[in-house]
Image (cartoon, grey):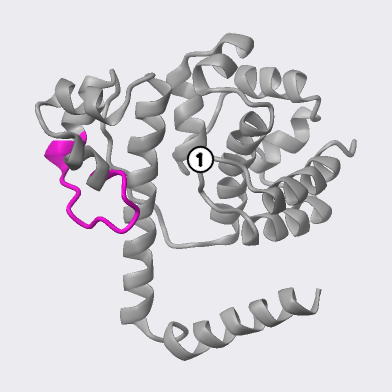
Amino acid sequence: MRKKKNINDAVEILHRTFIKDRPDRISSLETERVNAEVAKIIHDLRKDAGLNQKELAALIGTTQSAISRLEYADYEGHSLSMLNRIAKALNHRLTVLMIPRESEGNTIRYVFQEIIKKLRQSRGLTVRQLAQKLGLDPEEIIVMERNNGYRPSSSTLFKLSRFYEIPQIRLNALAGVTQQIPHDLKKQASKFAAHSESFSTLTREEKKYLDEFVKVLKVET
């Protein structure tokens, strides 16, 4: 426990020293996060399509090493043309979305994305498998997990509510469908957001915070 606190203290010191109140550092950090997210999306879509890197490379007329670079979190050479080629090869459509900087509402909707993704991962389901169980288009699952501005329909939220046994009114609040967010849900959402990472697998620590958050979500209001 002491070691964990020391690690957290070290991270906080590094943040204050090198990032806080430094627009250039903050911009660099945001760029790294975008690069990591793009790499993750390519990796996840390829896996969902059941392709290895060499097979995807063949579909878009490039090399396996090029795909490997694109899936590397620190790679900075992503281009819209290449991403569009990958999207078409995997039967997807590339879109560009700009959203306001972080706010409480954005945090809540980010948590909705992460909850939908991590609940799926916790049950060992692929996007297609979850879509089949819910009777939804796989594309909608992908958008829900990755698009902060997406608002699922009441029908979709109802299906999610029944499948995961979570009151729909609580999912509505996370999805931004309703403006009133219960205090306990808001508090736990912030805690979950602070410990959530956009990885393709669920870590043990994330599973712990997911379980805690789901308990709060299942509280009837």
Q: Where residue 60 sits in the image (x, y, percent)?
A: 14, 25
Residue 156, quarter of picture:
top right
Left or right of 164 in this view: 132? left
- State the residue at coordinates (31%, 50%): 72
- State the residue at coordinates (26%, 32%): 94
Q: Where residue 187 sits in the image (x, y, percent)?
A: 76, 59
Which residue is more in the foreground, 86 or 107?
A: 86
**Range of residues picked out in magenta:** 70-83
Regarding mark 1 in the picture, which secondary structure is present there? Answer: loop
- State the residue at coordinates (46%, 28%): 142
Q: Where residue 151 sits in the image (x, y, percent)?
A: 52, 33
- For disc 1, the marked residue is 200
Q: Where residue 153 sits in the image (x, y, percent)?
A: 57, 23
Residue 30, quarter of picture:
bottom left
Residue pushed farthest bottom? 17
Residue 220, quarter of picture:
top right
Q: Is residue 209 visible?
A: yes
Q: Main secondary structure of the magenta part?
A: loop
| Residue 79 drawn in magenta | yes
Vertical position of residue 26 compared to residue 107: above or below? below
- Mark 1 residue type: Ser
Left or right of 164 in this view: 37? left
Q: Quadrant of the C terminus?
A: top right
Density class for disc 1 (Cα within 10 Å; few <14, some 14-19, many ≥20) is: few
| Residue 171 drawn in magenta | no
- State the residue at coordinates (68%, 59%): 190
Q: Is residue 176 visible?
A: no
